[in-house]
């Protein structure tokens, strides 16, 4: 059933109706890839509705039970539901959950670690939009000029014309020829950690996300997933 977009965004807990109307006026809402206008209607169970490019309406509509799981994404998997090139996708690993869930943000093909998947559009928006400043922590194995690289990573930088910065950068360990860094960011730009390290003169050999907001990967093994508890969901929504 079609409803006004302002009503849908309000019902999904994204914002108030008045704020939704402002988003529509500013051209920040799309339906099936097309910019939506004030007063436009959409079907929440059929159409793909996005705010600032972030999907808000997973299949199943607002009546579907809102759930979220944590997956330990291995290297070699794409963060999509399917892949035109036939590469393994994260949805293959969570097929047994019985629901169609969407990735919250992305981890590139060669990155691994904590990946949330949900059918809750409002939660996806809260976790991925830069305005909410949700921290994401990565453990990064690097080689190169270590101290100069760390100093560069701790300063705001311009990479490919984009402003990027880390919340914090820590040295976890140092061995022969390589070092393990903890890098925390809030921005979540495309391949941000790899691009920042390259700009700092460091080569990334392994990248693993270990924390998102209040959630930690813990001892979840690569390729495995688990449902978030009610308490974990509550904390994510309130942080």
Image (cartoon, rainbow, N blue to C red):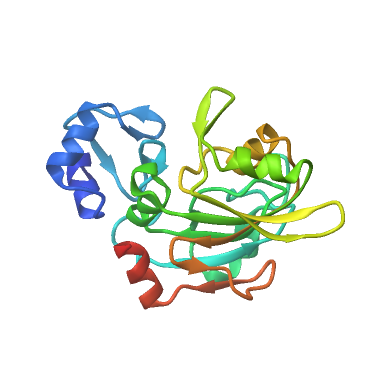
> In the shown orientation, is residue 206 left or right of residue 17?
right
In the image shown, does 128 or 47 lie closer to the viewer?
128
Most extreme residue toward the top is: 161
At 49% from the left and 73% from the top, the residue drawn is 227
Q: Position of residue 164 (x, y in %)?
A: 51, 35
Q: What is the quadrant of the C terminus in the image?
A: bottom left
> In the shown orientation, is residue 235 left or right of residue 162?
left
At 69% from the left and 47% from the top, the residue drawn is 109
Q: Position of residue 49 (x, y in %)?
A: 35, 41
Q: Position of residue 193 (x, y in %)?
A: 61, 43
Q: Position of residue 101 (x, y in %)?
A: 49, 59
At 23% from the left and 31% from the top, the residue drawn is 24
> In the shown orientation, is residue 190 left or right of residue 74?
left
Q: Is residue 135 visible?
A: yes
Q: Is residue 164 above or below residue 230?
A: above
Q: Is residue 92 above or below residue 106?
A: below
């Amino acid at each position: 059933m079609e409803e006004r977009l302002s009503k849908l965004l309000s019902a999904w807990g994204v914002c108030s109706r008045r704020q939704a109307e402002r988003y529509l006026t500013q051209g920040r809402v799309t339906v099936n890839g097309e910019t939506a206008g004030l007063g436009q209607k959409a079907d929440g169970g059929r159409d793909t509705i996005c705010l600032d490019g972030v999907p808000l309406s997973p299949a199943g509509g607002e009546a579907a039970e809102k759930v979220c799981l944590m997956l330990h994404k291995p290297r070699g998997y794409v963060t999509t539901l399917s892949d035109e090139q036939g590469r393994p996708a994260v949805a293959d690993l969570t097929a047994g959950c019985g629901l169609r869930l969407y990735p919250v943000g992305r981890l590139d093909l060669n990155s691994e670690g904590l990946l949330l998947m949900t059918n809750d559009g409002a939660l996806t928006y809260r976790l991925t939009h830069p305005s909410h400043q949700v921290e994401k922590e990565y453990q990064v194995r690097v080689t190169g000029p270590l101290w100069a690289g760390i100093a560069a990573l701790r300063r705001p930088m311009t990479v490919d014309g984009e402003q990027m910065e880390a919340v914090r950068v820590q040295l976890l360990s140092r061995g022969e020829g390589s070092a393990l860094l903890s890098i925390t960011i809030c921005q979540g730009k495309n391949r941000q950690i790899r691009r920042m390290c390259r700009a700092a003169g460091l080569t990334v050999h392994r990248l693993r996300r270990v924390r998102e907001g209040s959630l930690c990967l813990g001892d979840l093994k690569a390729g495995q997933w688990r449902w978030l508890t009610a308490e974990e969901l509550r904390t994510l929504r309130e942080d």
